[in-house]
Image: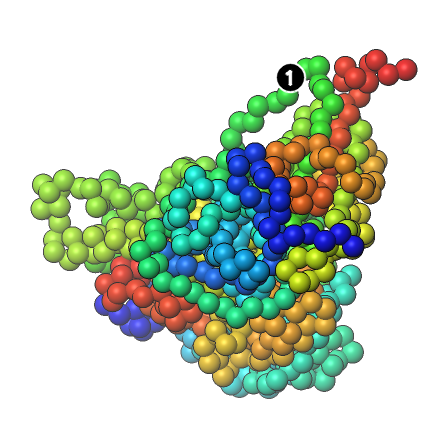
Amino acid sequence: MRGRTILGAAIALFAGAVAWGQGATPPDRWWNPDEGRTFPATLDYADATGTLRLLLDNGPMETKGHPFFTALGPNGRACVTCHQPADAMSLSAASVAAQWAKNGAKDPLFAAGDGSNCPSLPQEERASHSLLIDHGLIRIARPWPPKNVTPDFRLEVVRDPSTCNLDPKHGLASSQPHISVFRRPRPVANFKYIEAMGFAYDPKAGMPLPLDPETGKPVSGNLMADGRVPSLTAQMRDAAGTHLAFLKNMDAADIARVLDFERRLYVAQQTDRLGGALDGDGAKGGPRLLQVSAPGRLGSQGTPVWSEFEAWEKAAPAVKAGWTPEVRAFRASVARGARVFREKTFLISDTAGINSPIGFGNPVRNSCVFCHNMSYMGMDVAPGQVDLGTTNKPFADPLAHLPLFRVTCTGRPHPHYGRTILTHDPGYALTTGRCADVGRITLQTLRGLSGRAPYFSNGSAKDLRGVVDYYERRYNIGYTEQEKQDLVNLMRAL
Amino acid sequence: MIRVAILLAAVAANGGAAVRYIGCPVYRDTDNGRKSGCWLVEDEASGVRYDVTAAPTKPDWNHAVLVEGVQSAAAGDPCGGTVLEPARVSVLEEGCTRHMLAAEGYQGRRFALPERNVRPLYEERKRPDRPFADGRFTIPFDYQSRFITYQLSDYYLDATINYALDVQPAGIEVTGFADVRKVEVSGRTIAEPASLARERAELVRNALIMRGIAADRITVRVGRGGAPFVPAAFDGLAAPAARRVDIRIVPELSEARRGTP
């Protein structure tokens, strides 16, 4: 099945959670702040391709009064507003559209500060929230230039359908200049892996891992699309001050409770409607493996990435004979997809974070696991800021709904683009102020994908097939149709 | 100004002739697994196309490179060029027209993890035996660069930092070097700025501090000439040895210190 039907299917599945108590009315998929639900130890939700499972270590947990689930500021939002359990602790565009249909602008999700294209727009109109409703994008306003940084590039607005970058109050020329970029919320789960430090160095920076200024300790560098904060604690403060409009710092007790919850939570796809149990017949899909495994391991020197599905490849004929044709076909496809992911090499070129400045060469031949190299999670064991081109021209697809900026490098030119770059989101460069970092985005986790379309930091791939197709265009990989479908099936099984 | 012949008269320990030249790299896509591609750079003066794939830093097909290496007859011809091994490549700002060759029957090299690689934090690491000796380390750099090269400089940096962490308290002397001699290579006059020596040393100092070494234990100096503490970091190549940082780590409880009045 082509993934393009996924979005529609997701909306259709909004009827409710699965696996709730028999006979009881399942609670709404959407978690509103301050509901006071119990977060169970195991929580399943139907999604576009099967069932998503969340596991909470030492659960269940009462959410009444818990700061992750409580509206901390005047806009009525809580962390859970944009990190919904049914959406793999992210936020799918389908969920957003459903909330708009249900509540319109009065839903706290559509708060003016970042739930609209710009706070200056008329907030009751749908068009003012189009980037969130249609693309699942939250407005991220970053001060420009960054605090305590002298950038080596200039920023100009080429066009801005959001209106916010040219807005007299919120734009780049305002009294407090900010750049507005629009990004997908990242999943708040599986942090054991996201925070893991496999090596003491960041080869992309040629230096030891960055230090958290609060603790003086090294951090993984894998938080936030633009790496603007180094730790979950700092992320919480950042989010409380921006997304929740909660201007006072969270107190230490609140931070500790949120950290405790986030670090106990695991999410992954558990069943597939075609392939059945993803941990069936010897396979190790689902979140249980994440819960019990050691993080930060390099797949090439240990457990190969996505070898969770190897058992389906090696299953005895007698075992396979018990599978329906649909199950057999899907499982074979997922196992092939894992091999394609690891073994199908292609030429990676002009990609900052890979082809520069490390010394791998430009181009370099490698496969998806070159970057997605962490066992069980497919993240980068090293901090993973890479410019795939999803936000930079000429590689980015036409994205007429997003602002476009012209970056002019005032020091050394960019190693691959030269002195002038057109970008929808300068990414990591908004933190470092370096022209060489324009368009570099921290790699995302690959778990629970079916529950949280669209994909890439700017939501430019509306489904999993869109992700594969983008890579095909960007790197001229030469995937066969079968390989593309196998990769889609692999990703929907994660 | 010192004139350097295109083909140096020096003969390396393995019997091959040493070369130092600037040229535009060409990529040969041998499609033989990850990192299997070949890098070829022709020396315009001699017309010889060298295979520089063995260099830790690989070329960028948009930029000229400074090649330093020794011809290796024993390495065969996996890529369609005279193999330089050992070899060093430094990517220059000078532009080149990108060009890619098909495999044309060449197999390239199957990737093998280089011996000089940093081990993960989750692996047990052997600690130095007591009494702690003075430690001497060298970190090599590419031409005009203060970037810690992957699977070369990072290996030596990691060894330096681990030793410094293991033998604390210790005094640490970090000495930076730059190759400031003006030399002519392939019709260009090249030399590193003197300031690069201190920048390299400061970079190493910062790396030590980031890994937990107290700043007040570290002194930074600029050096000139002399042999590196760890010649093996250069695999016998002479010119790259002028671009380095030497680190001396003197444990306060070392045998050497005890004997010092």
Residue under numbered circle 1: B129
Which quadrant is home to the N terminus of chain A? bottom left
Nearest the eye: A421 or A196: A421
Whole-percent x and y of residue B152?
58, 42
Q: Amino acid at mark 1?
A: Asp
Q: Residues within 10 Å of mark 1 (few under 14, many from 20)?
A: few
Q: Residue at x 43, y 65 (%)?
A: B100
Reply above or below: A215 against A221: above
Choose top left, top right, bottom left or bottom right for residue B18. top right
Display coloring: rainbow
Return the residue nearer the eye: A179 or B99.
Answer: B99
Which chain is disc 1 placed on?
B
Q: Is residue A413 visible?
A: yes
Image-based side of B30 in relation to A348, left or right: left
Residue at the spot x=58%, y=77% of the render? Answer: A422
Residue B39 at x, y = what percent? Answer: 47, 55
Looking at the picture, how far across and down is residue B75, in whole percent? 43, 42
- Tally of marks: 1
Q: Residue at x 56, y 34 (%)?
A: B13
Left or right relative to B178: residue A374: left
Pinpoint residue A254: horizontal percent, then vertical percent: 63, 49
Residue A215 appears in the picture as rendered: no
Q: Give the residue at the far right of this rendering.
A: B261
Which residue is painted at 50% across and 68% down in the image? B98
Question: Secondary structure beneath disc 1?
Answer: loop
Q: Nearer the viewer, residue A68 or A459?
A: A459
